[in-house]
Structures are given as structure tokens and as C-alpha cells.
Image (cartoon, rainbow, N blue to C red):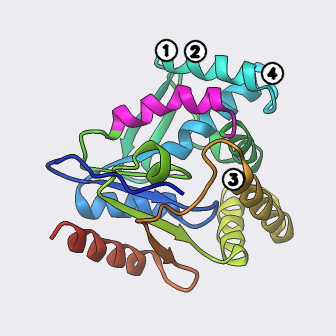
């Protein structure tokens, strides 16, 4: 089990949000960043970009060596770019192309879960994530923010919800984007991603020992954010 690490003195804290697929991390992290006036860093989108780039380049999601090389090349040439967007919180670009919608398909999402298990990919993106957040005043969400990327984050949350609830939310998002998938298929995808994320050998999904568990199965975004803000204020004295 990871041990809590003493955090260095920062003018503003790092807020780490981890949790499974469909827990609402992206929406809640975006809203929390707005309330706090912090920068949002969507680490999950980084892995989705790698998955999309691999798909386009014909690199199999199971090709660890090929994906590691691809990820390092993307970081080296600065291919990943994230822009603040008033409507969506963040807009994602790959070599200048807006791929904000392209990285949100079920296939790319499942691919992101697979490629994120490869050490070469995680190594390539780890420095990028730490550079984006080390000064503080940021909200980062992902699968291993509080355990691996920033074990010294001042405030950590583990956001979750029942699988059926997460599937319903994800299904509604996909239907809104015009993607014809059934609720049963979405629930199967959610459970498969849970198994992949918690069972992988490298940086598996788990709750950090000093993270607050937040189950929002029956709670809306605003109430969830309010609880998190209260926790941040409590931790900051």
C-alpha cells in the first residue's frame, strides 16, 4: 500500500481525483476547477490521445514496445495540446487537430484503458503530467493521480458510483453524441474497464490511503462539488 508523502509548501494545493470509468470525474473536476479558480488537467485525455494516435497509425493496443515509442514521440514533438474551453472545460488537440470528440468514443476509451497499462506509455506521460501540475493550483483527474503521479498532493479524492449508475450516465453521454449503443453494452464496457484498470500490473486503480472516498451514486454534481470544496477548506485550515 502506498504511504502518504509529506507535501511541499505550495501557494495553492494540488487536488487529485481518482476513480473508475463513468464516476463523473471529468465533469466534477471541471466544475471544481471553476469554483476554485484552478487549472484543470485531464490526464485521462492524454491516454485517450495516445490510443487515438495508435489507432490511426495502425499500432495494436497490445503492442507495448510500439505504443511506448509512439507515446514518447508524441511528447517529444509536443503533439498533445490542451486549451481552456468555456463550454467544455478543455479542448484537446493532436498535432494541431481538434480531437476533443474523436477521443470520446467507446473504442478509444477501451483502448485508453489498455494502453495505459503499458509502462512505456505511462513513463512517457508521467513527466508531462507532473510538469502540468507541480506548481499547484490545479485539479487533476485520472486513475493514479494520488498514488503515482502526485502522491504528495495536498488533497485527494476517490470518486466512485455503483456500476449500474455509471453505465447509465455513460450511456446518456454516448446517445447525446449520436452513438447507437445499448445500455447493456455500456454496462459491460464499464465492468470490463473496471477489471482492466484495477487488475493491471502497472499503476492499478486504487484508493490512496489518505484520499476521501466520495460515492456520488445518488448525488448530483453540485452537491458532490460542495462536499469536495468543504474537504479542501478543512485540509487547508
Cα distance in 3D space between marks 2 and 3: 25 Å
Cβ–Cβ under 8 Å for marks 3 and 4: no
Q: Nearer the viewer, residue 60 or 10?
A: 10
Q: Is residue 126 magenta?
A: yes
Q: Is residue 123 above or below residue 165?
A: above
- Dot 4 crowding, Cα within 10 Å, few <14, some 14–19, many 20+: few
Q: Nearer the viewer, mark 2 or mark 3?
A: 3
Q: Nearer the viewer, mark 1 or mark 4?
A: 1
Cα distance in 3D space between marks 2 and 1: 5 Å
Q: Which residue is mark 2?
A: 73
Q: Which residues are magenta?
A: 117-132
- Dot 3 crowding, Cα within 10 Å, few <14, some 14–19, many 20+: many
Which residue corresponds to the image point at 35% horizontal and 78% vertical from the top-left? 227
Q: Position of 11 compared to 93: left or right? A: left
Q: Earlier in the sequence, mark 2 or mark 3?
A: 2
Q: Is residue 128 magenta?
A: yes
- Where is residue 156, by image quadrant? bottom left
Amino acid at each position: 500500500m502506498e504511504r502518504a508523502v509529506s507535501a511541499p509548501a505550495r501557494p495553492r494545493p494540488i487536488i487529485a481525483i481518482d476513480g473508475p470509468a463513468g464516476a463523473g470525474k471529468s465533469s466534477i473536476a471541471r466544475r471544481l476547477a471553476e469554483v476554485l479558480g484552478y487549472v484543470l488537467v485531464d490526464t485521462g485525455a492524454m491516454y485517450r490521445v495516445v490510443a487515438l494516435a495508435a489507432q490511426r497509425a495502425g499500432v495494436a493496443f497490445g503492442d507495448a514496445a510500439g505504443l511506448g515509442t509512439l507515446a514518447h514521440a508524441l511528447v517529444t514533438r509536443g503533439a498533445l495540446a490542451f486549451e481552456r474551453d468555456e463550454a467544455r472545460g478543455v479542448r484537446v488537440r493532436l498535432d494541431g487537430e481538434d480531437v476533443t470528440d474523436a477521443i470520446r468514443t467507446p473504442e478509444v476509451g477501451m483502448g485508453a484503458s489498455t494502453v495505459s497499462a503499458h509502462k512505456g506509455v505511462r513513463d512517457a506521460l508521467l513527466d508531462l503530467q507532473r510538469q502540468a501540475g507541480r506548481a499547484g493550483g490545479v485539479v487533476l483527474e485520472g486513475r493514479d493521480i494520488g498514488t503515482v503521479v502526485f502522491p504528495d498532493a495536498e488533497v485527494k479524492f476517490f470518486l466512485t458510483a455503483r456500476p449500474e449508475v455509471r453505465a447509465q450516465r455513460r450511456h446518456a453521454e454516448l446517445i447525446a453524441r449520436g452513438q447507437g449503443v445499448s445500455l447493456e453494452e455500456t454496462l459491460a464496457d464499464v465492468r470490463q474497464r473496471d477489471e482492466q484498470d484495477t487488475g493491471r500490473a502497472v499503476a492499478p486503480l486504487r484508493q490512496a490511503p489518505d484520499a476521501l472516498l466520495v460515492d456520488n451514486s445518488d448525488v448530483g454534481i453540485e452537491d458532490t462539488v460542495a462536499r469536495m470544496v468543504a474537504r479542501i477548506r478543512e485540509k487547508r485550515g
